[in-house]
Amino acid sequence: MTTKFVPVSGEQSREGLSARADHVRERANWMRRRLLGMIVSAGQGHPGGDLSATDIIASLYFDILRFDPAEPAAPGRDRFVMSKGHCTGALYTALAGAGYFPESELDTYLKPESLLNGHPNRTYLPGVETNTGPLGHGLPVAVGIAVAAQIDKADYRVFALTGDGELQEGSMWEAAMFAGHRGLGQLTVIVDRNGLQQGARTEDTNSLEPLADKWRAFGWDVVGVDGHDHAALLETFDAACAPRSKPLCIIAATRKGKGVSFMEDQAGWHHGVPNAEQYAQALAELEAEMAA
Amino acid sequence: MSAAAAPKGLFDCRDAYVRTVEELAVADERIVAVVNDSVGSSKLGAFRSRFPERLVNVGIAEQNMVGVGAGLANGGKIPFVSGASCFLSARALEQIKADCAYSHANVKLCGISSGVAYGELGATHHSIEDVAWLRAIDKLTVIVPADPWETAEAIRAAAAHDGPVYVRISRMPVPELAREKAEFRIGKAEELRGGTDLAIIANGTLVHRALAAAEALAAEGVSARVVNMATVSPIDGEAIAAAAATGAIVTAEEGLAHGGLGGAIAEYCATHAPVRMRMLGFPGFLPTGSAAWLMDRFGLNAEGIAQAARELLAAKAR
């Protein structure tokens, strides 16, 4: 079972947190509208996983991570590794929103010669740390970055976002075992626990529970969070940035397709493209959400 | 496998490998070693004693090992990732492709005990497919050095190269090749002996055997050129074209007869310089036997190369 994480600093005023959460909420809503537009324009994409990960990625890029888009390879930058590499809609909109490249680039998504490939490519696109797509690759790379930080006694942080279905790959547990062994306090993994993989529920396919116990058994601290509650995400990430002696796994309870009623918790929207009517409805729902 | 010293006059290239990595590590603190429980078989014990913080042992987990290597490169390190070449190349093939080559990660992959070094252990432990698999991956440099000098040079060149490199390191005892004005450059073949009747192109443990074959052929009045093609990818087309101008090429490698060095040369010749060829290597899954026995059994020795050359010359004369 997951436990509530207690922020280490404890000095964050509620007003300050609320303002930060409002900013992230606005950015996440923009990302949702923008990525759906990209998918409609491209005629393909992975909206379900994009939307479940949007609030997590927005919290990181618009509040938590330290980076300079003008110097994407700065040695001291915080790293974000997108292990679930198919969810490019969420990643690309965040990178554009954070200033790594002009927002207009998003309009080229998946078109011939676009820098915005169906899976992230660091040689095309600034801000991407490693090329992912095949599942089970991002976490080992994030572990290697954290080992480099550990050797150098550097203070940058490494965040990796993994899908929950992705944890069926053995390489994830090779990496988890080693991160626990090395006591990689620089490393935070966020599991986008929406409960669905491409074809069905994770628990009906190759069950993951008791998931928190598995990470703990590999030497990790584990906390749970509502993956769509911006204030809770920010509090959890704030605490994750405090000095630690163990790697941290944040199991974020999410809903696939979050924010669009007809996509929510539907395996069928793992990939899929809304038709014109559905797209209009999705935008209306997202605009109403911001107005609320 | 025992770690017995190589016979007198012969060298274990792993020694040159670890000596060079240590030298580089003294001068450049970015150099780190990553292993999969293979400190002993990679001969990295002294490196670990000298640079304990810079030896990362991930345990028996090759996919993670290569991913960690890519991550270390992202963190500004120059990782030398060492493991038995059979497992490094096969179990982590997708990590080599996606995390290293496709991501342009500055990772140096060192396949230890390559070819049939683990002869008696069976085909699971033979690494005869690695060159064929890895040379198919775009933007991955593949080097198969022939002796201790070339191993050390290849490691230095790999460290200086910006991008992923696979260096195949033998543990079979080999002699130091005699060279005049030796220079190692990635992608550049080395002509070890001039010749006009045919060319023998080899790499790794076959190079000194190719030289011995050329000696035997010379005694019969045959002038055989010997080319050491250490870099399989990118391949040296100029050297291949010059070899093809002799009218016949024999290739020899401690790997599959198809897909590796011979395959790379055949592809080049088919497109640019059609020529009679014989490709010497292993046919596929092999029986149990020592490395030396397997090399002889499948004709990967001086006599086998010389015989292939004679047959090819006979065909050329017809």
Image (cartoon, rainbow, N blue to C red):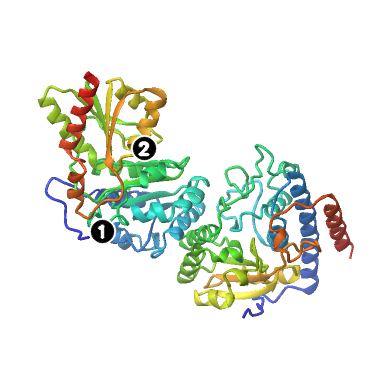
Q: Quadrant of residue A234?
A: bottom right
Residue at left offset 12%, top offset 30%: B216
Q: Mark 1 or 2 closer to N-term?
A: 1
Quadrant position of residue A7: bottom right
Residue highlighted by disc 2: B232
**Placement of B247 over or under B299, stated as above or below:** above
Work out how far the residue at label 1 is from the one at label 2, CA to CA, in angstroms.
27 Å
The residue depicted at 59 percent of the width and 76 percent of the height is A209
User: Going by the image, does A138 lie left or right of B167?
Assistant: right
Q: Residues within 10 Å of mark 1 (few under 14, many from 20)?
A: some
**What secondary structure is marked by label 2?**
strand
Q: Which mark is residue B121?
A: 1
- Which marked residue is nearer to the observer: mark 1 or mark 2? 1
**Amino acid residing under circle 2:** Val
Q: Where does residue A156 sit, x and y in percent of width and height? A: 57, 60
Image quadrant occupied by the N terminus of chain A: bottom right
Q: Is residue B148 left or right of residue B263?
A: left
